[in-house]
Amino acid sequence: MLLKRLSEHVQLYEDADFAGMTEEAKDLVVRMAKFAFFAYGWMMIIHVGRTTSGHSKDSRHYPGDALDFHWEKDGKVVPLEAQRAVADLFDWTGKGEYPEWNSPGLHRDRRSLGELGQGTSWRLKGGEYLVWGRDPIEKMLELED
Ligand SMILES: [Zn+2]
């Protein structure tokens, strides 16, 4: 996968649209990327930002309020548990984990919260979604990757 350099702490897959993301999402991405870079020396690699197709019907990628990414250190993918721990320091409300991507990583978005103020978390493994947070049946309809 060809990479474009966005900054000293962020690279993009060639076709990833970062510029089209919402200002709020971009701000979160930049703060998260800087923290991971200066605290741990991690490079963020963004797979997808805003996009117009290929995701679920109500995907937050369409309005540019989501991203898929992973972190690398010294050219190696950072363990997913560590990626999650750092990403969870920031105020994303939709949180996906994809351990079976070629470079295992995360989805993060800014969806609206549930009635109890909760976000949604999920993990896709072996073709199955494990969902926690909001009502699983409702959430299955809103999943994205
Ligand atoms: Zn995604």
Image (cartoon, rainbow, N blue to C red):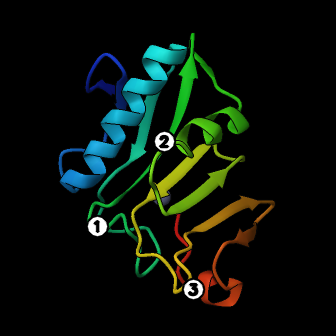
Q: Amino acid at mark 1?
A: Thr
Q: Nearer the viewer, residue 29 or 117?
A: 117
Q: Which residue is mark 1?
A: 52
Q: Earlier in the sequence, mark 1 or mark 3?
A: 1
SS at badge 2: strand
Q: Verify CB contact (< 8 Å) between mark 2 and mark 1.
A: no
Q: Amino acid at mark 3?
A: Leu
Q: Which residue is mark 2?
A: 69
Q: Quadrant of the N terminus?
A: top left
Q: Is residue 2 visible?
A: no
Image location (x, y in percent) of residue 73: 57, 16
Q: Amino acid at mark 2?
A: Phe
Image location (x, y in percent) of residue 138: 61, 89
Q: Which mark is residue 112?
A: none
Image location (x, y in percent) of residue 7: 26, 21
Q: Is residue 33 left or right of residue 108?
A: left
Q: Earlier in the sequence, mark 2 or mark 1?
A: 1
Disc 2 to disc 1, C-alpha distance: 17 Å
Q: Kindly identify the residue that appears in the image at 29 percent across and 57 percent down.
A: 50
| 53 to 36, vertically: above or below | below
| 119 to 58, vertically: above or below | above
Q: Which residue is mark 3?
A: 141
User: Within 10 angstroms of label 3, few (less than 14), some, or many (20 or more) residues?
Assistant: few
| 130 to 72, vertically: above or below | below
Q: Kindly identify the residue that appears in the image at 31 percent across and 35 percent down.
A: 30
Q: Kindly identify the residue that appears in the image at 36 percent across and 63 percent down.
A: 61
Q: Quadrant of residue 96?
A: bottom right
Q: Earlier in the sequence, mark 3 or mark 2?
A: 2
SS at badge 3: loop
